[in-house]
Amino acid sequence: MKTNYFPTFSILIETANLSMADLEGLTECLKTLQNQEYSPVNAREVLLLDNGSVEPALLNQMGQPYSWLRIQKVSSNMGYHEVKKEGMLRTTGEVVVLADSDCRYEPQWLWSLLKPFSENPEIGIVAGETTVATQNPYGLAMGLVYIFPPFSYKTILYEADNYLLNSVAFRRKVLEKCPLPTDLSIYRGNCLIHARQLREQGYSIWKQPLARAIHACPNGIGHFVDRFFKLGSDAWRIQRFLPSGLSKKNKANVWKLRLFEFRGRFEILFSRNREKMFKLILALPIAAAAVFFFLTGTAVAVVKTSLNKHE
């Protein structure tokens, strides 16, 4: 693969997601980066930032096969978004590529994210598409209701209203003018707030459907309950960061989990593989449980907000 110009770039990964996930996910993540068609050895640096979620000796052992990987420590007090923001400051490439330790990346992922920057100097943000594996009933249930929709199966760039930090690339100058907000009392809604801020400042968010990632599903019952409860809480709390004049319909469109996309997701998943229909009977109770914990999280957030107003 050759081009007349290619931006310098850095890749950033973190371990903050591994406290409740299987460490095998990090191993798979690094393997898929090693197998990229456009090798990570071309990066200015590939940083794996550790906030203490993994034993140092084990982390060093896991990273040893990859000469291009640099492991750096950050404060154990830093959460997911804080680690991402700190990592952005430590990189030096013209473009910062963000990945997650619990994702697997298809071989053309890195090249597909970077290529638009070389083709159009006006492009400042390119986001990939992230979904979950749906081979079994649990994965199928997550494909129906989790925060990662099915792949669009488009083949060209298209403009979007959001991005995910597990598969996105920014020009550094964009992040300098509009940094990722971290001082928000929400769990995973920072990207939605940041995306709105970016668009308000005149930046377009471009989705690259050829840059595809597979995200891990919640690992275990505790993680499952915790994740959907917090996402439900986010769905309510995030509204206070939106313009007061925004319609209820538009506010609903920025919820972290869009429950009413179920029909569209169902059509995409089953139109491409009708053999999954027999798994649906097992998947639906799991999806229903996820919706229950999501709505419970929303209800608790509503009650807490109401109580705080009356104090």
Image (cartoon, rainbow, N blue to C red):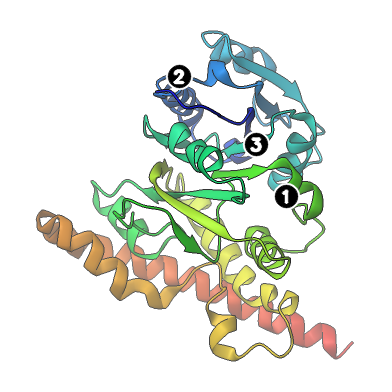
User: Between tags 2 and 1, which lies in front?
Assistant: 1
Reading the image, the residue beneath label 3 is 95
Quadrant containing the N terminus is: top left
At x 75%, y 82%, the residue is 305
Q: Which residue is mark 1?
A: 174
Whether 36 is drawn above or below 278: the answer is: above
Which quadrant of the structure image shows residue 282?
A: bottom left
Name the residue furthest front: 4
Residue drawn where x is 84% and y is 88% of the image: 309
Q: Which residue is mark 2?
A: 34
Amino acid type indicated by mark 3: Val
- Few, some or many residues within 10 Å of mark 1 (<14, 14–19, 20+): some
Gap between marks 3 and 1 measured at Cα? 10 Å
Sequence-first disc among 3 and 2: 2
Q: Residues within 10 Å of mark 2 (few under 14, many from 20)?
A: many
Please state which of residues 291 and 262 is positioned toward the viewer in this rendering.
262
**Around disc 3, counting alpha carbons within 10 Å, would you say few (fewer than 14), some (14 to 19), or many (20 or more)?**
many
Q: Nearer the viewer, residue 183 or 115?
A: 115
The residue under label 1 is which amino acid type? Val
Closer mark to the observer between disc 3 and disc 2: 3
Q: Earlier in the sequence, mark 3 or mark 1?
A: 3
Q: Quadrant of the C terminus?
A: bottom right
